[in-house]
Image (cartoon, grey):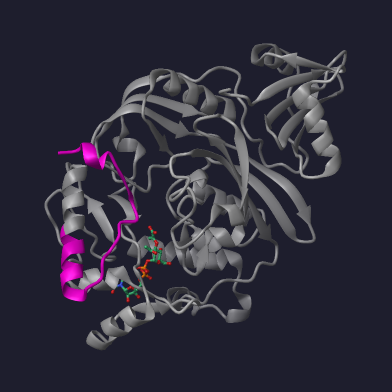
Amino acid sequence: MFLEFPLYRALDGLDTLYRIDGPRHFVEWQPIGSSRWLVHEHVAEIYPSQVLIQSLIHADDAQLKLSREEWNARRLKRKEPEQENAVGTIAQTTEDPAVLEGMDLASWTTFGISAHAAHWITAHSDDDVRFALSWRQERDAALLVMGGGSNMLMHADWEGLALHVGIRGVRVLKEEGGRIEVVVGAGENWHDWVMLALKNGWHGLENLALIPGQVGASPMQNIGAYGVELKDRFLWLEAIHVQTGSLKRFDAASCEFGYRESIFKSSEKGQWIIVRVAFFLKKNAPLQTAYGAIQQELKALPEESWTHADVAKAVMQIRSTKLPDPKKLGNAGSFFKNPVLGPDEFKRLQTAHPEVAHYPQSDGTVKVAAGWLIEQAGWKGKHRGTHGVHVNQSLVLVHYGGATGAEIWQLAQDIMHDVHSQYGVQLEPEVNQIGLNRSK
Ligand code: EPU
């Protein structure tokens, strides 16, 4: 049956409320005093909580099954204080979200290409996501999931529903021996989250400062920069299934992370909406300073004094000189992936071009700097009026204003063609192409 979860329960004769989000995840509202709730988030991983969640799902004699409306009416009778150690709460909503018509996506994507979504819903909670899923299922509308719009190029208007995931909140799950586990709503801005973590002394994400986009999109392509990838700090994520509405938790192994890859871009593509991501961070996480440009930035300071904040500052300095700020100039970061070549293929390339910028990988393959190939092929800083190749980083295509997705795609294809004919290397776009087969 569609939308099995969430289920709403109350203890008969008592004020305690439960919302069951999936077979292993439930939230408990426990009354304290006359006017407040204490909210506990439970993951049923061990025996007693597994038994409890089963009894809640089936609602034994002591429990009442409530509709969402009845349950919300009970919940609204009290206030929800923040948990003692929480810096926020993961959002819940009480009303269905609005469905807007004809939304221009230009300001919702960092490329800033104008394209209209026929319908638009912003989801502030899991319930809102389920509402949107059933809304579009009833109308058989195509679904476009939007995070920060920082990794997509729009080729055409979107005739179906654009679902913007705006689930906010940051909650500490566990803090023990200098290790902190934190769950973050998919709709939080990635950079703001990195800065919040740094401010709290939760270290390990500094090298990923200033990456545009939202937290929920970060696992999709296992974002990475300056020697750190999301997977290095990832604990689990929760996602809602597009067809059934059920919530599932994915640990790192089941996400199948690779270089700019995850299961959500391959076999499970289009199947899940990520609603929150949990991270493990450390008070004394080692500083990641191996990347040459970071060393360069930090060299004015004595090495013994380097802090996580210094690394974050160095990364922000490098990014802001090399990469265009999407608020000022439309772009989606690296448009292409760095190609990964087998040892023989790489040897052939290096023999012909000994100066090729590259990074040997632990499995014997070699990652080649696509930016180097594109620059050598003569494309760095090339301008086509409304769009072009960035002057400081050839991997980034930029939109000066007034370009269509098709024009930017044509530039990308011309670059791919030249790099292939000059170096025999096939580049692959990193950015998602939306509506490509529908554009002229
Ligand atoms: N290079 C050139 N010309 C260029 C760009 C690069 O010759 O125009 C050569 C240089 O030799 C340079 C080397 O390529 O030393 C590497 O350049 P850079 O340090 O800028 O890294 P990248 O491999 O081009 C990747 C990521 C970036 C990430 C940086 C830093 C991909 C597709 N891109 O770029 O990620 O910020 O490393 O870790 O893996 C993104 O994904 O949107 C992104 C910006």
Instruction: Give the side of residue 358 with respect to residue 56, left or right.
Output: left
* Camera-nearest residue between 259 and 230: 259
For the point 54% across and 78% down, which residue is it?
A: 301
* Camera-nearest residue between 414 and 55: 55
Q: Quadrant of ligand 1?
A: bottom left
Quarter location, residue 147: top left
For the point 27% across and 73% down, which residue is it?
A: 372
Quarter location, residue 121: top left
For the point 47% across and 50% down, which residue is it?
A: 220
Q: Is residue 436 magenta?
A: yes
Tell me if residue 22 comes above or below residue 73 in the rendering.
below
Where is residue 35 drawn, in percent x and y? 80, 19
For the point 17% across and 72% down, which residue is it?
A: 377
**Where, quadrant-wise, is the N terminus in this rendering?**
top right
Where is residue 224 drawn, in percent x and y? 47, 61
Q: Is residue 117 magenta?
A: no
